[in-house]
Image: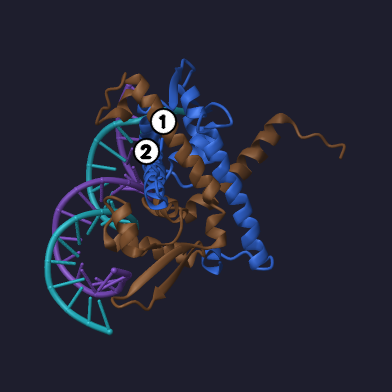
Chain colours: A brown, B blue, C purple, D cyan
Amino acid sequence: MSTKLNKEDFDQDVCGAHHMAIRDTMDILNGKWKIRIIGMLSFGPRRFMELKSGIEGIAAKMLSKELRDLEVNGLVTRTVLNTKPITVEYELSRYGYSLKPVIDGIAAWGIEHRKTIINMTKGRVSEHHKCYL
Amino acid sequence: MSTKLNKEDFDQDVCGAHHMAIRDTMDILNGKWKIRIIGMLSFGPRRFMELKSGIEGIAAKMLSKELRDLEVNGLVTRTVLNTKPITVEYELSRYGYSLKPVIDGIAAWGIEHRKTIINMTKGRVSEHHKCYL
DNA sequence: CGGCATCCAATTCGATACTG
DNA sequence: CAGTATCGAATTGGATGCCG
């Protein structure tokens, strides 16, 4: 192509596509808990109660709802096991598993973030560390 | 060390640290708009109105609030320019810029996700594509 | 155990109007 | 332009009880 895209247009395009892609992803990972649920499931299948125990602070109602959202979007599969008291196992689908690099990236940043906090507070960990950056 | 960590304990530890890290990150990126704001700013400084125009659907109140959150957490800097009508420029701090790989990972997944959708719908793009997976 | 239903409180979000 | 103020709507969340 001989037509040249100037820098402004290029930025416009790249930036726009980038932003649309972020929106697409975050539409699916919306809400307070989905990323954490996927994070747990990225280590293998988990039962409802395991998820509830592992994700501190989540109410059964919300866990139920978020899992249903993820199931509808094809990221998670739900399997009812025929155990004595009924047991349900949730697992990442292959498609859901494709989010693992993203989730791991988020986790990796969190680890670095915590190190940064500890350095800046010289070891004193504050309740409101978020304000000390 | 001669003491052996069995697989369950190992999983427990790794999974717990992973999950705590996710929580740390998402505590900072909470809310509906922060990731999208950081995404825009990852291409360079932007003025308030540029952000508002670029992020479709955000209200001035929310943009203002989210930017303040990000500023408090040290991810974004705010500069008042002495132009005729006052102008304010927002920019990622070096620390905020360290999130770029994370944001780009989210965007990359969104691009693949959209491709997946288009394949599964054989080109027909649905309003409710999220339900077709 | 794994939910759903209901009620209610708290928080978040959005539209509009307004200011320096 | 870059916000703030205000109100109301929507979402989120907790508690409790019930069911198979």
Direction top: furthest residue: B82
Type of the residue with mark 2 = Asp
The correct choice, above or below, for B15 with respect to A93 in the image is above
Using the rendered image of the protein, determine whether residue B59 is visible from the camera's viewpoint: no
Q: Residue at x 63, y 60 (%)?
A: B116
SS for dot 1: helix
Tell me where residue B25 appears, x and y as whole percent: 41, 38
Q: Quadrant of residue A84?
A: bottom left
Within 10 Å of disc 1 (Cα), the crowding (few <14, some 14-19, many 20+) is: some
Q: Is residue C1 left or right of residue B81?
A: left
Instruction: Kindly identify the amino acid type of the residue bearing the numbered disc 1.
Output: His
Q: Which mark is residue B47?
A: none
Pointer 2: what residue? B24
* Vertical comparison of B23 with A4: above or below: below
A75 vs A118, nearest the viewer: A118
- Residue B1: where, in percent of width, then height? 41, 35
Task: Determine contact: label 2, label 1, CB under 8 Å.
Answer: yes
On the rendered image, what quadrant is the N terminus of chain A found in?
top right
Q: Which residue is nearer to you in this view: D7 or B133?
A: B133
Q: Are marks 2 and 1 on the same chain?
A: no
